[in-house]
Image: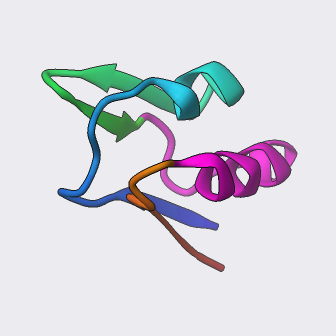
């Protein structure tokens, strides 16, 4: 799984709260720390994408 955060990100921090192993808010935008994302974090990444208010998290499987 590859995860990206697009420019719609508002740095709300929800993704970082849900999966801090993968997401980190830095400089007014979330960034992905692991590429590719290990399987153990796939469900949390999907949850973060669903809960993102700006729909900025994009997942490629």
* Extreme residue toward the front, this view: 53
Left or right for 10, reference 38: left
Q: Relative to 33, is 41 above or below?
A: below
The foreground one among 36 and 32 is 32
Res. 26 image quadrant: top left
Left or right for 32, reference 11: right
Quadrant the N terminus occupies: bottom right
Colour basis? rainbow
Left or right for 8, reference 4: left
Identified at 62% across, 20% down, the residue is 17
Q: Is residue 37 magenta?
A: yes
Res. 22 image quadrant: top right
The magenta segment = 33-52
The foreground one among 51 and 41 is 51
* Extreme residue toward the left, this view: 27
Quadrant the C terminus occupies: bottom right
Q: Relative to 24, is 42 above or below?
A: below
Q: Relative to 20, is 30 above or below?
A: below
Majority SS type along the magenta span? helix
Identified at 17% across, 26% down, the residue is 28
Query: Residue 39 placed where, x, y %?
Result: 82, 53
Res. 19 image quadrant: top right
Q: Is residue 56 magenta?
A: no
Query: Residue 27 placed where, x, y %?
Result: 13, 21
Report how many numbered discs are placed on residues in the image.
0
Identified at 33% across, 37% down, the residue is 31
């Amino acid at each position: 799984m590859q995860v990206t955060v697009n420019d719609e990100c508002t740095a709300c921090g929800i993704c970082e709260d849900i999966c801090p192993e993968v997401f980190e808010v830095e400089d007014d935008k979330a960034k992905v720390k692991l590429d590719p994302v290990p399987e153990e974090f796939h469900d949390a990444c999907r949850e973060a994408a669903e809960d993102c208010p700006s729909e900025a998290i994009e997942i490629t499987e």
